Amino acid sequence: GLSKTIDGEKVLNNVSFIMNKDDKIALIGANDNAKTALLKILMGEMEADEGTFKWGITTSQSYFPKDNSEFFEGNEQTLVEWLRQFSPQDESESFLRGFLGRMLFSGEEVMKKPSVLSGGEKVRCMLSKMMLSGANVLLLDEPTNHLDLESITAVNNGLINFKGSMMFTSHDHQFIQTIANRIIEITPDGIIDKQMTYDEYLETVKK
């Protein structure tokens, strides 16, 4: 029964659903603020005006926000130090370097300061942070923004193969079609919830 009004506009209207193991849910709908609000509420970063939610006791969540600037602003650490703060164990520098290497930060690049990174580099850092968490539920708000085609393909394949559950937003048709097995459309009147691929969902809407 989650509801939320932002700047006088009701973006979430009595939203209820159960997320199942292995669900890969694409959140769609015309209002990007509504999708972001739902993810923020589920991550405890925003209060709902009404309603409650509860995560299963065996779940752990990791969140990819659409706006990641707060993670990098004014940060004068190296990338290795930046990543270490999100490490469940205090991992060695060689481990963290290896982890950053998977995200294409090699050699001296791992000594860069987070505040000087490009948009695409910041996305790669945030994905490293999520991988390091070992969470079994991912919430991703437009993870392909700022990425080049090769990087989008890599993220796409990684999420297809991810063995946990996820909820994500994207404006990339192919990305949604290849990952999602469930579509939740957020509308002004509530949600439309279908266990199917994006293309199948679009066909049902046409009819």
Image (spheres, grey):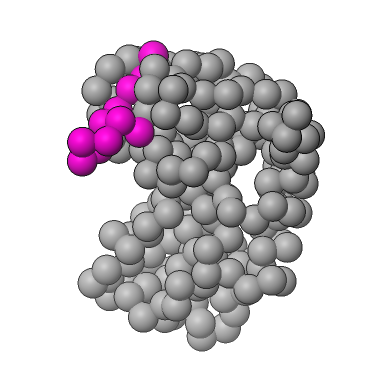
| Corner quadrant of residue 39 | top left
Quadrant containing the C terminus is top right
- Residue under the point 45% across and 78% down: 118
From the viewer's perspective, tell me whether residue 174 is left or right of residue 167: right
Looking at the image, how many numbered discs can be counted on the residues? 0
| Corner quadrant of residue 162 | top right
Residue 40 in sight: no
- Residue under the point 49% across and 77% down: 110
Furthest residue to the front? 207
Image: 65 above or below 58: below
From the viewer's perspective, tell me whether residue 143 is left or right of residue 33: right
Q: Position of residue 63 (x, y in %)?
A: 46, 44
Residue 158 in sight: yes
From the viewer's perspective, tell me whether residue 141 is left or right of residue 20: left
Image: 122 above or below 190: below
From the viewer's perspective, tell me whether residue 172 is left or right of residue 122: right
Furthest residue to the bottom? 108
Majority SS type along the magenta span: strand
| Corner quadrant of residue 73 | bottom left
Residue 4 shown in magenta: yes
Residues in magenta, as a range: 1-11
Image: 148 above or below 32: below
